[in-house]
Amino acid sequence: PSGEAVMPRLENKYAQRSGSELAVANFKQSMPASDYAALDRLEAFERDVMQKLDQEAITVIEENARNTALITTISPFALFDALVTLWRNLRMIRQVATIYGVAPGFLGSVGLLRQVFANVMLTGGLEAADGVLNQVIGGSMAGKVSTKLAEGLVNGMLSARLGLSAMDHCRPMPFEPDSRPRLTTVAKRLVTSVRKAVMSGGDKDQIDESKA
């Protein structure tokens, strides 16, 4: 669709979303349709509105990845780990979808999870997450990380990949090449956060259970 057709839909959609209405109002005031070309307005909307939503989504993804990694590291029960991770990833994807104005019900969320997970598996899945772990902490250090901690970090990074794929799936505008969130960036913050929590004793209070 042309910029002229897309812009009114985007403006109306996000003007009605709690949390983005002010950004849309400021955008309309600074970039009135009567004074600017549609492509210029699309670029400004990307910068002034969509990138703020992207940051909200990344915050949700990083929090979920961190808590998933910590739960896996701390818990001695593999089945519990798997069930909690599945539930948390489903919840994360629903949160990401809601940020972008998509509000799937439970069945819709499950369908979205299946689509996102299939996309992640097609692009490498666990192997990619494991590769990023080695890239972020270094091959020599990876060999010294405990099996349980490594498992937790890989699970956290897989959750992050699911979240980033959900962003691609739900975002109404494609990312600009230089603005697409990268797994390596998320992974570096994840490793730092989880390592700090584990070194402080792996206290379960480190996990935000109010959002678990």
Image (cartoon, helix red, strand yellow):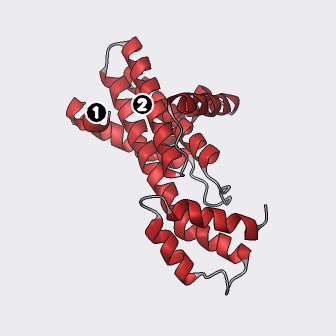
Location of mark 2 (residue): 88
Q: Horizontal and vertical percent for residue 163?
A: 53, 40
Residue ID for mark 1: 198
Q: Mark 2, residues whose alpha carbon is within 10 Å: few (<14), some, or many (≥20)?
A: some
Q: Could one spot residue 193 in this view of the protein?
A: yes
Quadrant of the snapshot with the N terminus:
bottom right
The foreground one among 140 and 49 is: 49
- Residue 153 appears in view: no
Query: Going 44% across and 18% down the picture, which residue do you hit?
Result: 82
* Picture quarter with the C terminus: top left
Residue ranking furthest to the bottom: 35
Amino acid residing under circle 1: Val
The image shows residue 63 at horizontal and vertical percentages of 38, 42
Please tell me which residue is depicted at 60% across the width and 81% down the height of the picture: 31
Q: Are marks 1 and 2 in contact (CB under 8 Å)?
A: no
As drawn, 25 above or below 85? below
Q: Secondary structure at mark 2?
A: helix
The x, y position of residue 177, in whole percent, is 68, 58
